[in-house]
Image: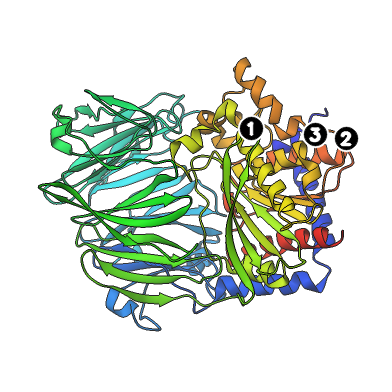
Amino acid sequence: MADFNWLEDLDSTEATAWVADRNAETLAGLTVDETYAQRRDQFREVLDAKDRIAYPSWSGELFHNLWQDAAHPRGLWRRTTPERYRASEPDWEILLDLDELARQENENWVWQGASLLRPDYRRALVSLSRGGSDAVVVREFDLAERAFVTDGFTLPEAKSDVDWIDVDQVYVGTDFGPGSLTDSGYPRQVKRWRRGTPLDDAEIVYQGEVTDVGVSAGHDPTPGFERDFVSRMIDFYRSEQFLLTGSGERVRIEVPDDAWTDVHREWLLIRLRSEWAVGAVTYPGGTVLVSRFDDFLAGGRELTPVFEPGPTTSFRYHAWTRNHLIVAVLDDVRQRLEVLTPSDGGWQRTVLDQAPGLDHTDVLDTNPEHSDEFMLVTDGFLQPATLRLGRVGGTISTLKQAPSFFDPTGLSVRQFFAVSADGTRVPYFVVGPTDGGTGPTLLTGYGGFEVSMTPGYDGIIGRGWLARGGTYAVANIRGGGEYGPRWHLAALREKRPRAYEDFAAVASDLIDRGIAERGRLGIEGGSNGGLLMGVMLTRYPELFGAIVATVPLLDMRRYHKLLAGASWMAEYGDPDQEADWAFLREYSPYHNVRAAPPYPPVLFVTSTRDDRVHPGHARKMVALLREYGHDVSYYENVEGGHGAAADNAQRAVKWALILEFLWRRLTAV
């Protein structure tokens, strides 16, 4: 196999010329037809729609929002009151105009969020990235003055982690110089930095190992429950959590290192990934426990299960209000929300919401410092989103209704179960013509990092695929979180092929049921889902008529040496260990490309600014496929980070290329 590692050099003359040539070929092949421009413009209308919901986040008594549209492609950071938000056209106070800032500073700034100082929310630590990368510049912002603070807290570009302690102190993890980062490129040290002092003088609070993923610290200013915490992330699924006392002592929260914890007021929540024996009781993985935090730290082990997994159920996430706990539970990938309330007799449970049919309701946000209010979003594959506001024990009212971007008449949503190679039942959703239709089918999946693929409204898929007569399918394969930790662990490390067998089983089931036709079934996935696409290309090419992989992992021999790759070794394995490389070698797409059998046409999409999954994965795969004579296309956006697009115009281009490529290749059969 030829050595294409030179394509990992992002800015070399040779590599950039190669990218420019591939981009030109792809754009020449896909953008000459007027249907491409139509799709691009339609998608831009969806993304920039004035009547789409401006989803808010709660900060004290105000709603904050980052709004992007055609006039403000980089965005407006703004705020309003809940009362004003109810208006059809709310009166927003503009805090920061990202487009104006980018013009003034001649930077391609992309918003990456803001950490607001509680309890008055007057100051913020704003994160801005160049072109959408994970690395950010951090700058202190005064919300009352609507301006950056002169000589305020500022960090240069790095993968930083920063959190307020008070108005004059922050916890900061960043690139302090040699030895301060882990192998994964994240902070190894966390320091306490005081206003008006040089960053070099900040005192170390904690230092992890270079082999860790990263460390961080945070402050909880809740009145009466003020606490400081330090977290050491050993790998992607194991960590150590500490309470940091006023004297600087670290007190370990003694839970299994693969458990996840959260502290709210007097409560400690523990989510188990594996079995845990406490005294005479053994709790299975997937259980969620609650205890009083101070009692637990003192050695008490009065644990109350607030969720116990069943054969078809799993805990997805939780959200606190001031006095209640909201949990999201999946049952065969159908979600319901429950409210748990502490009482003298234990935790009382009531159902908060469950969307009808195969629609889906999520908690958008709560306001736990101030109230028992919550915001819910309900949508589905064919149902535009509805945003609602409620209070535990009270009524729930509609705040906003999203527009419909395509006509759902004649379309339906169904759920099926395929049988994988080892007999496991694998659920998947199908959206398309009720009578079956004659258009091509697009299947997507992910299958990693315990991420669940749940129903949701997508105006781009609706306009660009369903409205043209296509069918859309979503596979809930192992490696995801649809059935809790056990579903994820079933495809971890050497078991990774189970995820690929599941996806192939769903594809075959679509064909067997007559929903899809062989040769007219396309697939698409990104990141870990891009790795999934690479395996489908090299291991199951006969099932598919076209494939698209975005920001993919593909070279499993070198992934841990590229950017953040070392942080994923708990998911995939360590290629430097002979035993691990033995199973990675079996499916690594880059190492399994062959001249025969023939592969379906494939498009790879990535970004030069992706500093999470190195674009070298896609570059090298394309070069190798070209050497073998396969039909391969490539598009690399300069901006965009791991999303491969930095604004709505770029997102519209990306999705127009993807869907036009798939539609042309699948309908040309």
Q: Nearer the viewer, residue 116 or 433?
A: 433
Judge depth for marks 1 and 3 and give the one in front.
Answer: 1
Colour pattern? rainbow
Q: Amino acid at mark 1?
A: Pro
Dot 2 or dot 1: first in sequence order is 1
Q: Amino acid at mark 2?
A: Ala
Q: Amino acid at mark 3?
A: Val
Residue 328 relative to residue 611: left or right: left
How far is mark 2 from mark 3, CA to CA?
A: 7 Å
Q: Residues within 10 Å of mark 2 (few under 14, many from 20)?
A: few
The answer to which image quadrant residue 420 occupies is top right
Instruction: Residue 392: tell me if it is visible.
Output: yes
SS for callout 1: helix
**Residue of label 2:** 595
Residue at 38 percent across and 54 percent down: it is: 139
Residue at 77 percent across and 62 percent down: it is: 663
**Residue of label 3:** 593
Q: Nearer the viewer, residue 533 or 527?
A: 533
